[in-house]
Image (tube, rainbow, N blue to C red):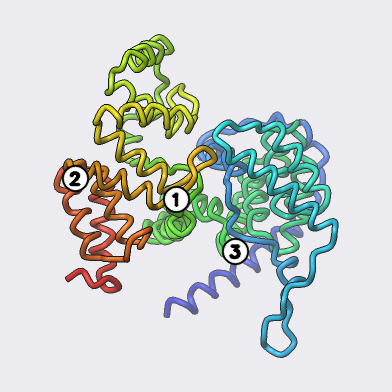
Amino acid sequence: MTRPRKWWMVLVILILYSSLTVADSTADEEADNEGSEGEESLDGSQEEEALAASSSEDVVSDTFHDGASNADSSESTDGLSETKQEQSPKEIRANKLYETAMSILNHTKQDEQHAYEFLVSAAELGHTEARQKVAWARLLGKHLKQNITEASEIFEDLAIKGNAEAQMGLGFMFATGIGKNSSQAKALVHYTFGALGGSQWAQMALAYRYWSGISVASNCETALTYYRKVSHTVADEVSLSGNRAVQRVRLLDEVDNPGSSSVRLDDDLIQYYQFLAEKGDVQAQVGLGQLHYQGGRGVEQDHQRALNYFVQAAEAGNTNAMAFLGKMYLEGSSVVKQSNETALKYFKRAAEQNNPVGQSGLGLMYLHGRGVPQDYKLALKYFTMAADQGWVDGQLQLGNMYFSKCRMPLV
């Protein structure tokens, strides 16, 4: 019964959108001419969506590719997939420009202006993901000069070709009234198409709307469905050998203590910690190492400094520093070459001294078979040890294992 109801909802949305398009087409043209002014203000729920969308262009990995380009590259005449067509010199150059830009953005010391110069060049050559990022930058006036008309044109062109992120962009424009006559109905339609296509931002926008009851009847189960889709996508993208560090934030804590995890540390206090670290204070070394490892709170993300502080503290016998060195080598970065062997060494040294971070790290290695034979029993053992000491990652991984016990022989 669930599947027919979903398709019925989509059919109703399509009919609704068709009628709205005819009624609002003239108003949209007027809004496009005025869109370049970019001086519209946001309030209430619109400001909430603007906050989510403002970081959309910083997402490292896009989750949905241009449907038309996929169709061009992999058509089948007998039910079997054909090999991808060879790329043209133009496509090869566009891909290289995009990869260069993303490499710069993924570096711990980013040169965003330089990266976006490459993205603009790749977008001019027709690179889909580059065009998405350029459109968001033009829309929000971040990294590039604001040009709402150009952003709208890019989104509309990509949306016609089936691009989910472009649907999200159009939904945001209709929701906020930036470059478009505000229409929550059209915003809902575009968000829905974007979410169906796999856009994480569209899924989160829909989830928030269903949770808050914005333009739709409040429905926590539907909100949970969309939030779960996003969580599964993020979990699939996070690897143990690369990518940016992921910082977990408990949303209820943010409600109770807004901004508590991002309060900027006083410069004098940071300098004092640096002074202590240089004098050999191990706790200061570990604290600064963690700040530079994650970035934030007024401290620039710098894995080289994090590595130096952790090494100093580990040599002095600090088990937390050993465990974080294990994390750095397990994940790898532009500073630290990924090494399961080195990660295992540091995790073992920490875990042998009953450090919960090291125990949780060993659990991850056995859970995923990273440099060791995959062993769910040992993973369960180490996660349990870490969880018993109150380490949140150990508790999280232990919960995940019990939740997935149907696929994991825990006993």
Q: Are marks 2 and 3 in contact (CB under 8 Å)?
A: no
Secondary element at image label 3:
helix
| Quadrant containing the N terminus in the rendered view | bottom left
Residue 170 percent across, percent down from the top left: 67, 50
User: Hey, what amino acid is under mark 1?
Assistant: Gly
Measured in 3D between alpha carbons, the distance from the residue under mark 3 to the one under mark 1, in whole angstroms, is 23 Å
Left or right: 289 as drawn, with respect to 76: left
Secondary element at image label 2:
helix
Measured in 3D between alpha carbons, the distance from the residue under mark 1 to the one under mark 2, in whole angstroms, is 51 Å
- Crowding near pointer 2: few (<14 within 10 Å), some, many (20+)? few
- Crowding near pointer 1: few (<14 within 10 Å), some, many (20+)? some
Q: Nearer the viewer, residue 304 or 76?
A: 304
Measured in 3D between alpha carbons, the distance from the residue under mark 2 to the one under mark 3, in whole angstroms, is 47 Å
| Quadrant containing the C terminus in the rendered view | bottom left
Residue in the image at 73% along x and 73% along y? 84
- Quarter holding residue 46: top right
Q: Are marks 3 and 1 in contact (CB under 8 Å)?
A: no
Provide the residue designation for mark 2: 352
Provide the residue designation for mark 1: 213
Residue in the image at 28% along x and 18% along y? 281
Left or right: 341 as drawn, with respect to 175: left
User: Hey, what amino acid is under mark 2?
Assistant: Glu
User: Hey, what amino acid is under mark 3?
Assistant: Gly
Provide the residue designation for mark 3: 197
Q: Nearer the viewer, residue 245 or 170?
A: 245
Residue in the image at 27% along x and 35% along y? 320
Q: Nearer the viewer, residue 23 or 299?
A: 299
